[in-house]
């Protein structure tokens, strides 16, 4: 399936997986792809686990849901436990090294083990860990150009937080450069 | 301390060239489309509603359709419309009766449990020839069920749902774009037939974000035209028709002997006319050995599953009913003689009954049910399709 | 159908009374001694005096007054049982220029339709609700209503309404008066000329507040049901004064202009 890519992004509620999912879908759309983004929440609004699935395709997208994803971004241990076994053969995962013990990572899986929280902290805000992880994913998959995703920030970040766009762009870049 | 875990070295072929490298890379873009917005099915539906000229919305919060009332609470007043958060779904559907009887484009939205509460009102709408749109972004049932996707409300939607012999026109969107487009279609159907029209989606269609072109579909009717269709039936205060005009009455009660029989004959005549509205989408059915029949979100997931089938030399097509009532039975009947069918639906066997009635024994009809509430991907449908291929 | 025209003056007879044009000339289906006729007349007179009939929309309810549309010469819409205030909300939102009113019995408004009624009132919908309280379900044959008096015998309280198992009568006018969206809430009775005159003023006021855009207008009318009370009309009239008014005090419980 040329031009097809999918990813499940998962973490605690509040870690911003929905934001990076939206950002990736927005950037993909702006790059002319068909895209789908679908969130799956726990019953809790905050603090529970949350995940979303993004599909990019140059064909009309059938299933927006993916049982065995080509890639994942996991920001906490419960998410790793849930999605690592489901990764498709030859799949790749971006694992948040700041919150996930290294010995939990299956060494047979292609993994970018990235200290997203620590890197985000250095950038001035631990909430940027999601952007760091997405940056790493962009480099690992080459699904979209970094610049396209950075550009899309303006459409996804609300006007109230527009001042945070540069630091988000920097976080994406830091993750990209790490991976 | 931290390091890039070079697991990719353990697996040949992995590198920075992409998990599954797209041919053509970033430059495969087929042109930018700035008019596309990224919107959830719910959001697309709300945009469609205001763009189609909706005047009144009534609803009560319930997951997974909350974006619809949330957006319309802001959008409708900007367009001179009225938004009411009702005290219950019972209240909401009865407000729809009121607004629909006045001949203005109006809608309610809810999800399964709430739609059950609305059935009394929907029956009254049908019995009184009142136009209106009811959106059901269904969730798992029975009872409180769960918040996941489900097609368990198929029977309720297409067989009437409320008391008495009545039918709703039912549209089943599979994409956010269809959520937008079908709001126009639903309002047109509601006013042409002066009948309740249901848009039946589910948690996947509701919550899925996709690019949507926010442009009215070709041939879409204006709200002025729709309102003109019911000019001779709406209630408005008789003075609007002249000082000596006769008062109007919209009702569903017919107690005199034989009166209700006449009313039902009239309704049946209308339902017969509705049969011409059947809509469906076909993919590769012409030379197919097996045709998968699935609607809504399962329809699109089935399409992915068909793409993923290993090469067997056998051809598999997809038939996606877009109107669930009227059911596109004529089209199925034409396909029947030389093909077998597999109905895939997210319930424990509902649409399969309509397929079997349509095919009427002319070819084998297999069935695969996905349990309500589950979020499934295409992989889960590959095996059932292969099994049906035999 | 029988027509009031038959009752018009013949030959040299002089008219001393006529119906107003908002009320149809049909003879009603109501029982002898029923007060729906008086209530209809009051509402039609008010609409006539306001010159509002041509922009009036009546939302009917389920109960004895289900066929009120046969008697009012205005555009009418039937509502499911209890839902008249919700239906009227939809009408009001779709037709802001109309004069919208419901006409509901005690079962319709104070039992099955309590939620719709109280919430329409609380939203301050610019509608008028005429509430007929006769302490019994009339159309279905005399079962207990939410307004049935303690001790009152009905076909579902054969020994009389028992406060400990069935609760007491709901005082809807007082409840309505607590709601911010209600511009006017009053209770009147239809058992005497004096009370009927007061009721007419209350009905008028319940429409005035709607038309002035002040909010929800509510008027409760204590009415007789000789058939299901198993009384003759005179005794039924007396019961309103002796049994009902002590439980359902008359008066204006809320009037935003008076505040």
Image (cartoon, coloured by chain):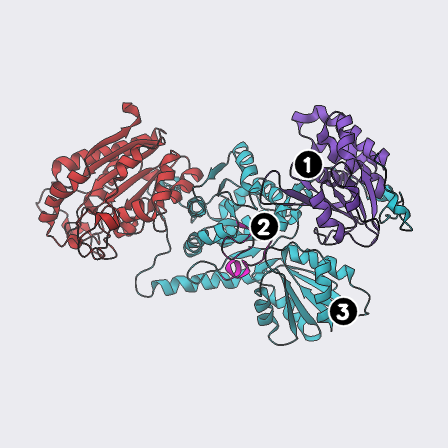
Chain colours: A purple, B cyan, C red
* Mark 1 → mark 2, Cα distance in angstroms: 40 Å
Q: What residue do we see at 20% from left, 51% from top? A: C161
Residue segment shown in magenta: B135-159
Q: Quarter holding the N terminus of chain B?
A: top right
Disc 3 packing (10 Å; few <14; some 14–19; many ≥20): some
Is B134 situated left or right of B322 in this image? left
Q: Is residue B137 magenta?
A: yes
Of the 4 image quadrants, the one containing the C terminus of chain B is bottom right
Give x and y (percent) for residue B139: 56, 52
Q: Give the numbered dot on residue C27.
A: none
Which labelled disc corresponds to residue A15?
Answer: 1
Classify 10 Å Cα crowding around label 1: few (below 14), some (14-19), many (20 and above): many
Q: Mark 1 lies on which chain?
A: A
Question: Is residue B77 shown in magenta?
Answer: no
Q: Distance between the residues labelled 2 and 3?
A: 31 Å
Say yes or no: labels 1 and 2 on the same chain.
Answer: no
User: Contact, CB < 8 Å: mark 2 with mark 3?
Assistant: no
Q: Are marks 2 and 3 on the same chain?
A: yes
Q: Is disc 1 placed on a helix, strand or loop?
A: loop
Chain name for mark 3: B
């Amino acid at each position: 399936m040329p031009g097809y890519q999918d990813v499940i992004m998962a973490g605690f509620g509040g870690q911003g997986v929905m934001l990076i999912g939206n950002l990736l879908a927005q950037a993909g759309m702006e790059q002319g792809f068909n895209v789908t983004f679908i969130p799956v929440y726990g019953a809790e609004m905050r603090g529970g686990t949350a995940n979303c699935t993004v599909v990019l395709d140059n064909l009309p997208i059938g299933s927006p849901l993916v049982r065995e994803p080509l890639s994942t971004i996991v920001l906490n241990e419960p998410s790793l436990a849930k999605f690592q076994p489901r990764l498709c053969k030859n799949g790749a995962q971006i694992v948040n090294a700041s919150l996930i013990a290294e010995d939990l990572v299956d060494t047979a899986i292609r993994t970018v083990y990235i200290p997203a929280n620590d890197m985000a902290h250095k950038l001035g805000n631990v909430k940027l860990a999601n952007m760091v992880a997405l940056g790493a994913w962009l480099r690992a998959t080459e699904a979209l150009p970094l610049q396209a995703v950075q550009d899309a920030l303006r459409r996804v970040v609300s006007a109230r937080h527009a001042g945070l766009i540069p630091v988000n762009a920097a976080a994406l870049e830091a993750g990209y450069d790490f991976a | 301390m931290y390091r890039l875990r070079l697991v990719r070295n353990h697996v040949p072929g992995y590198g920075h060239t992409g998990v599954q490298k797209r041919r053509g890379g970033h430059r495969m873009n087929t042109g930018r489309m700035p008019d596309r917005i990224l919107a959830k099915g719910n959001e697309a539906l709300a945009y469609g509603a205001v763009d189609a000229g909706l005047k009144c919305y009534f609803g009560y919060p319930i997951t997974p359709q909350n974006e619809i009332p949330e957006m319309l609470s802001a959008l409708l007043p900007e367009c001179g419309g009225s938004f009411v958060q009702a005290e219950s779904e019972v209240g909401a559907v009865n407000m729809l009766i009121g607004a629909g009887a006045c001949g203005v484009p109006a809608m309610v939205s809810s999800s399964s449990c709430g739609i059950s509460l609305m059935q009394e009102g929907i029956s009254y709408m049908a019995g009184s020839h009142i136009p209106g749109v009811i959106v059901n972004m269904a969730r798992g049932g029975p009872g409180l069920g769960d918040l996941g996707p489900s097609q368990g409300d198929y029977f309720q939607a297409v067989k009437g749902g409320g008391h008495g012999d009545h039918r709703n026109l039912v549209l089943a969107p599979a994409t956010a774009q269809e959520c937008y487009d079908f709001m126009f279609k639903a309002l047109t159907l509601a006013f042409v037939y002066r009948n309740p029209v249901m848009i039946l989606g589910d948690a996947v269609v509701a919550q899925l974000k996709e690019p949507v072109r926010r442009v009215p579909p070709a041939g879409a009717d204006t709200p002025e035209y729709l309102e003109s269709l019911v000019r001779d039936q709406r209630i408005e205060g008789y003075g609007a028709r002249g000082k000596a005009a006769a008062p109007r009455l919209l009702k569903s009660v017919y107690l005199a002997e034989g009166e209700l029989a006449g009313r039902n004959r009239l309704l049946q005549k209308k339902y017969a006319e509705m049969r011409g509205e059947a809509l469906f989408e076909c993919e590769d059915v012409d030379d197919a050995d097996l045709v998968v029949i699935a609607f809504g979100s399962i329809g699109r997931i089935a399409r992915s599953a068909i793409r993923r089938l290993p090469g067997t030399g056998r051809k598999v097509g997809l038939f996606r009913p877009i109107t669930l009532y009227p059911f596109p039975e004529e089209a199925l009947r034409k396909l029947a003689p030389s093909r077998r069918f597999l109905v895939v639906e997210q319930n424990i066997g509902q649409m399969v009954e309509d397929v079997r009635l349509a095919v009427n024994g002319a070819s084998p009809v297999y069935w695969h049910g996905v349990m309500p509430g589950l979020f499934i991907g295409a992989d889960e449908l590959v095996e059932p399709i292969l099994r049906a291929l035999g | 159908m029988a027509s009031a025209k038959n009752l018009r003056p013949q030959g040299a007879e002089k008219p001393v009374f006529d119906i107003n044009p908002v009320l149809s000339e049909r003879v009603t289906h109501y029982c002898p001694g029923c007060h729906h006729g008086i209530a209809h007349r009051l509402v039609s007179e008010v609409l006539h005096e306001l010159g509002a009939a041509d922009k009036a929309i009546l939302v009917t309810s389920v109960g004895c007054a289900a066929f009120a549309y046969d008697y009012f010469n205005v555009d009418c819409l039937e509502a499911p049982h209890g839902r008249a205030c919700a239906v009227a909300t939809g009408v009001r939102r779709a037709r802001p220029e109309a004069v919208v009113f419901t006409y509901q019995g005690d079962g319709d408004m104070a039992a099955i339709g309590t939620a719709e009624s109280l919430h329409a009132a609380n939203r301050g919908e610019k509608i008028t609700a005429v509430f007929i309280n006769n302490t019994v379900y009339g159309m279905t044959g005399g079962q207990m209503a939410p307004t049935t008096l303690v001790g009152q015998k009905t076909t579902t309280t054969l020994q009389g309404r028992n406060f400990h198992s069935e609760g007491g009568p709901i005082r809807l006018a007082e409840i309505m008066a607590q709601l911010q969206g209600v511009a006017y809430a009053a209770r009147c009775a239809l058992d005497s000329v004096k009370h009927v005159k007061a009721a007419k003023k209350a009905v008028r006021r319940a429409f005035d507040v709607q038309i002035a855009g002040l909010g929800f207008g509510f008027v409760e009318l204590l009415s007789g049901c000789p058939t299901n009370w198993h009384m003759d009309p005179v005794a039924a009239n007396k019961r309103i004064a002796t049994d009902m008014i002590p439980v359902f005090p008359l008066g204006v419980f809320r009037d935003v202009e008076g505040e």
